[in-house]
Image (cartoon, rainbow, N blue to C red):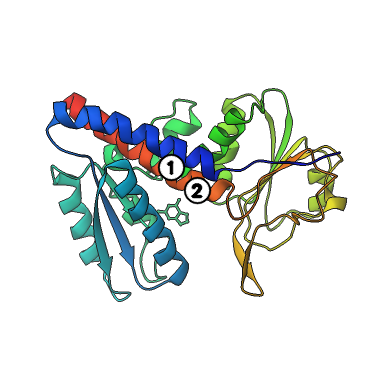
Amino acid sequence: MKTKVLWGKDLAQEVIQRVASQIKVLKTTVGRMPGLAVVLVGNDPPSQIYVSHKTRACERAGIRSLGHHLSSHTTMEEILYLIQRLNTQEEVDGILVQLPLPPHLNQSKILGSIDPNKDVDGFHPYNMGKLSLGEESIAPCTPKGVMALLDYYGIPVEGREVVVVGASNIVGKPLALMLVNRMATVTICHIMTKDLAIHTQRAEIVFTATGVPHLVKRDMVREGAIIVDIGISRKQGKIVGDADFQGLQGWARAITPVPGGVGPMTVAMLMENTLQAFRMRARTR
Ligand code: GUN
């Protein structure tokens, strides 16, 4: 079986171009461009790279990015004060707090302090609650990017047996909700799952988001399975995903590459979400 590679990078460019052309039109009626505040706390190297990708995408989309790089010693009071200011700042349509945060900060309280209408990451309890009710408002970027990729390649999920490996609040849980909202039969596996392979072998589509390099191998999935690799880690200096990309060639029906698969879609969905927040705010003024 020839394994199809599900690239995300070209689709992400297309999405960003589409966002850019919509912003071009809207800008004249609203009287300004959309603004995205990006809050980065500390000096985590991968976070710095992700933030630079997001800032670059903003330039291409016609979104004004307002960077707030804070020291790793920032206190809760300081960060909550900044978010309050951003919540009320007229030219800020979206607020993104890059994760992970230094361990002394209360992530849940910080994410909960963002105005849900400006919550372009979709992590606020209101937006996560809407997602769980099947009434998506602003939805988390990575799972939204995964669904957009599946749609683009014409891969339906309705009625299919799917497994999500990883139960994080950022990816695994919201992705499982999106899949169940689309009537897939969903199993969620995580670090305490006793025998991962039993579950993954049953799946028609395996979604994996653990950050464990090459966790998902050929003998763990059925022939003809579709593998959506949302993991990203470094192995001997190289960026790799959760799936053994080489070992799955000729066995899987389709697989997303790392890098160049889901990653660029996350950034493109952030541009879409910022446009969505800009539209929502323009409508209510
Ligand atoms: N860290 C890893 N993924 C994400 C994401 O989608 N949003 C934010 N804010 N931080 C992240």
Q: CA distance from mark 1 to mark 2?
A: 6 Å
Residue 134 placement (x, y as % from top left): 49, 26
Q: Residue at image x 38%, y 53%?
A: 54
What is the number of the mark on residue 268? 1
Along the line of sight, the residue nearer the viewer: 178 or 242:
242
Along the line of sight, the residue nearer the viewer: 191 or 29:
29
Q: Secondary structure at mark 1?
A: helix
Residue type at tag 2: Pro
Q: Quadrant of the C terminus?
A: top left
Is residue 8 rendered to the left or right of residue 214? left
Residue type at tag 1: Ala
Q: Do the CB atoms of the residues marked 1 and 2 lie less than 8 Å apart?
A: yes
Residue 142 seen by the camera: no
What is the number of the mark on residue 264? 2
Residue 71 placement (x, y as % from top left): 28, 74
Residue 221 placement (x, y as % from top left): 83, 45
Q: Residue at image x 50%, y 32%?
A: 132
Along the line of sight, the residue nearer the viewer: 108 or 257:
257
Q: Residue at image x 32%, y 42%?
A: 61
What is the number of the mark on residue 252? none
Q: Is residue 110 above or below residue 280?
A: below
Q: Is residue 263 above or below residue 238?
A: above
Q: Quadrant of the N terminus?
A: top right
